[in-house]
Amino acid sequence: MAQSEGTTTSFLAIYISIRDEIVQIQNDRTRSLDQLRELLSKTLTEFSSSPLSLFQFECGVNPMQIQSVQLDRIMSSMLNIVEACGGSEGERYVASAVVACAETHSLEEDRGVTKSERLRALGVTWLTHFLFPFVVGRGRDKRSLGQYSALVSENKNTEEGVRISQRNRLLLRDGFSCVATCVLDDSHPRPDEGAAQVWLEAARILPLTLSDFDTDEQSDSYQSALLTLEILRNIASLQNTITLTDLARCINHESNMMMLESNTCSAFNRFEWCLKSTEEENMYTLQYFRNTGIVGSLRSRYMDVNAPVEIKDRSAAFMFTLSSSFLRCLSHQKSSGCEHPLTPSLSLPNPYFISIHAALFDILHASSADTFFNAMLRHYAVVTKDGHGREPAPRCWVEFEQMKEIWDLREVLNASIGGG
């Protein structure tokens, strides 16, 4: 019978205990990536037959539902996919981490921690502190830019005025149309006769949850964000000097945003589709999970469903037709202060961020972690199908575990009152 744990505290302790071994193997260039890959393959083949490779999560109490995911599939999927965003160094990190679990001869063994338990701790840590923050962030972005109208704020110095200004800059850059479907925004200055116009959402490529943490460095959300950044730095081969502050600035920068039709935006946040890079710069193809869905339906009205997506600055075609109020609004855009070297100077959607989203898309579906998270989050109504959910929503796995205890207790009390 596979183990089901109440919290992940013990797993994190084991993961932290093997950090140094992971780094040592990463930096040992006498061991080639091919050698590490081979060791990883043997290790995961053995681990897959262990009951510890199955992670189970108990949802609710009456009745209880158990959701499960194979940890060995998560680790093998990450090795096979991270090259697309992190290159050979990303692969080397994944392989080194698994090999470290197999080879570590430290105090952990004296404490009775086996190789399978170390592998389980690694898989759970990647599941809860790397994949989960990307998934739980779906739908949260609508509160940041999408809820504001395109009208010019009376007070340009207010936060609302800044956000309106940023949304208008994004609209102008993307040609007042959805990047993926070409559906027009209702503020388009010269729409084709009879063209459907809707309110477009400013979608973040990397989710807002990555920058949503308490300033108290000892808080759960800050420590969790720090661990997520550590894993992301290794997976995506980011510079070790990148801080949480740097990441937060990039998350809220225009290079991490693109305009999408509302349903298309929700599907993007749910990893139902992604943009795959091509050999041609700034040209992408759409990859769907299962079927084209609403995105394909909307695209079929304007183009071939499989037509490539070209991302470019389309502002030049509109500069002489915009209203004076719209232009005045643009002039009040505040600098985000994001000077990270990954951020393009033209503030186009960053291809590096797009590649990270695409890698997450592949990992989640190849490992079935998406099915695990979807069932779990919908059970607790953290995120519903339309993108709305509980407020406040958990920002990290630790907060989710804490909220789960409250929700389960509430369920017991409600059942008790109802039964009485």
Image (cartoon, rainbow, N blue to C red):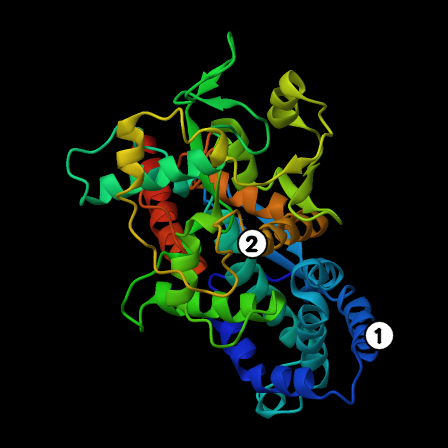
Across and down, in percent, residue 77 comes to: 72, 58
- The residue where tag 2 is placed is 353
Which one is in front, 25 or 354?
354
Tell me: residue 134, above or below residue 181: below
Q: Does residue 317 appear left or right of residue 288 in this picture?
A: left
Q: Identify the residue at image location x=73%, y=64%.
A: 79
Q: Identify the residue at image location x=63%, y=82%.
A: 22
Across and down, in percent, residue 115 comes to: 69, 79
Q: Which mark is residue 373?
A: none
**Could you give the CA–CA distance between mark 2 and mark 1, rounded to whole angstroms?**
30 Å
User: Label 2 crowding class (10 Å Cα cut-off): few <14, some 14-19, many 20+?
Assistant: many
Q: Earlier in the sequence, mark 2 or mark 1?
A: 1
Residue 385 visible to an observer of this rendering: no
Residue 253 visible to an observer of this rendering: yes
The C terminus, quarter of image: top left
The N terminus, quarter of image: bottom right
> SS at mark 1?
helix
The residue type indicated by label 1 comes to Glu
- The residue where tag 1 is placed is 38
